[in-house]
Every structure is written in structure tokens, then in C-alpha cells.
Image (tube, rainbow, N blue to C red):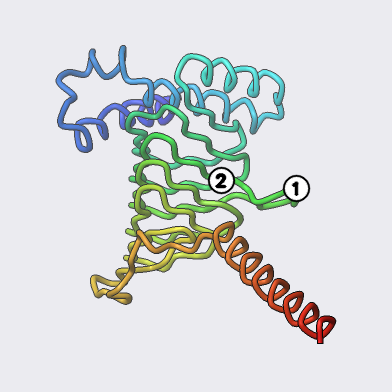
Amino acid sequence: MIKFFKLLREDVDVVFDQDPAARSRTEVILTYAGVHAIWSHRFAHALHKRKMYFIARAISQISRFFTGVEIHPGAKIGRRFFIDHGMGVVIGETCEIGDYVTIYQGVTLGGTGKESGKRHPTLKDNVLVATGAKVLGSITIDEHSKIGAGSVVLKDVPKYSTVVGIPGNIVVKNGVKVKKNLDHHKLPDPVSEKCDMLEQKIVELQNEIKELKGDDQS
């Protein structure tokens, strides 16, 4: 029990490390939805491990209603986890999150389908996931890596890497740029590409019809 309350106290302490707007412990305890969501999850997870699944899930849904953060009771979350402006955060059942991890609003740590078993991401220690990023599937984001805002990550990310884009591309690894010319405004648009293909096909058909009409007249 002492260890559990120490864990809750660390959840408050990390806010002062990550958020310059935090002014007092009272303010953090009473007004920070991210802290409330984490505390609710720690309690729900303890019940989940004791196979009290319905109560655990009910607590997680009540927490979701009040905080806007949805964390499945089965997710494993380490020490000093920080959710900043957590509205819209979703963390799946088989997620595993290490220590000193930070995520921002709109982040999804989800699955890619109806697969069973380990189907959600693993985030190692000191990972940061920025606003609106989606990390999907049973992949691993290794230590000290960063996921850029709005990115969609579908593959493993090695240590000390920075990932951006849709789908996510590693642009920095061990402090060295690995891709210099990543034009985010030129991301592929499959709908536009399909329309271009159809337009080209129509032009070809029109030319064939003209040729056939020419043969008939001759």
C-alpha cells in the first residue's frame, strides 16, 4: 500500500517537471484531468489484475466521462507517466508503457484490427508522443524516442529516434538526420492518384473511340 501511494505521489511530482504552468500541488491534484485519469487507471488496473473485470471497466468508463481520457484497465503503465491536456487520449488493453513517458492530447495507442493477444504498442522509457499522433499495432517505440504531432506509426522505432509523417518515417536516429528532404506538404494522396488514373483512362478511351469513328467514315 505504501508503494502504491508513492506511485500516486510521483504522478503529481512529474507534472512539475513537464508543465511550467503547474503552480502548486493542490492545483495539480484538484484540476489536472491527466492526473485524475492516471490515478483512476492505477486503481482500475489493480482490480483488473485481481480479475474484477467489470468493476475495473466501470471505473475506467467513469474516468473517461469526467476526464476525456480512455485507458483500458488492462494497460500496463509505469512510473511518472504524464498526460498533458489529455482530451481524446485512447490507450488500448495490451499497451505497455515504461517510466517517464509523456503523451499529449488526441494520442491513440491502439490496435489495427481484431487480432488477439498482444495487439497494442509498447512504449519504452522516456518516450514522448506528441499531439494527435497514432501509434497502432503490436509495435515497440524504443527508449528516448519521439513521435511527431499528427504522425501515424505502424512499425517499430529504434532508440533515440524521431518519427514524423503519415506513415511515420524516421528522420533522426541517434542525433543524426537520416532523411534530409522530407516534404510533409507532398504526402501521397491515394484518392487523388486514383482520380488521375481514371482521368488518364478516360482520355485513352476517348482517343480509341475517335479512331474507331475515323475507320467507319473511311
Give the secondary structure at mark 1.
loop
Q: Amino acid at mark 1?
A: Lys
| Rendering coords of residue 63 (x, y %) | 52, 18
Identify the image quadrant of the C terminus: bottom right
Picture layout, residue 61 above or below residue 128? above
Question: Is residue 78 found left or right of 84 in the rendered image?
Answer: right
Of badges 1 and 2, the one in the foreground is 1
| Rendering coords of residue 206 (x, y %) | 70, 71
Q: In terms of sequence position, does the residue under pointer 1 or pointer 2 come before the other?
A: 2
Of the numbered discs in the image, which one, if any, rests on residue 203? none
Question: Camera-side residue: 130 or 95?
Answer: 130
Which residue is at the far right? 216
Report the residue at 36% width, 34% height from top.
83
Question: Camera-side residue: 69 or 44?
Answer: 69
Can you identify the residue that label 1 sits on?
114
Q: Residues within 10 Å of mark 2 (few under 14, many from 20)?
A: many
Report the residue at 15% width, 20% height from top.
23
Picture layout, residue 87 above or below residue 27? below
Question: Is residue 173 found left or right of 75 in the rendered image?
Answer: left
Measured in 3D between alpha carbons, the distance from the residue under mark 1 to the one under mark 2, in whole angstroms, is 15 Å
Tell me whether circle 1 and circle 2 mark residues in contact (CB < 8 Å).
Answer: no
Report the residue at 28% width, 72% height from top.
174
Give the secondary structure at mark 2.
loop
| Rendering coords of residue 200 (x, y %) | 62, 71
Image quadrant where residue 209 sits = bottom right
Q: Amino acid at mark 2?
A: Cys
Report the residue at 42% width, 66% height from top.
169
Picture layout, residue 210 above or below residue 82? below
| Rendering coords of residue 122 (x, y %) | 52, 53
Can you identify the residue that label 2 sits on?
95
Question: Camera-side residue: 184 or 130?
Answer: 184
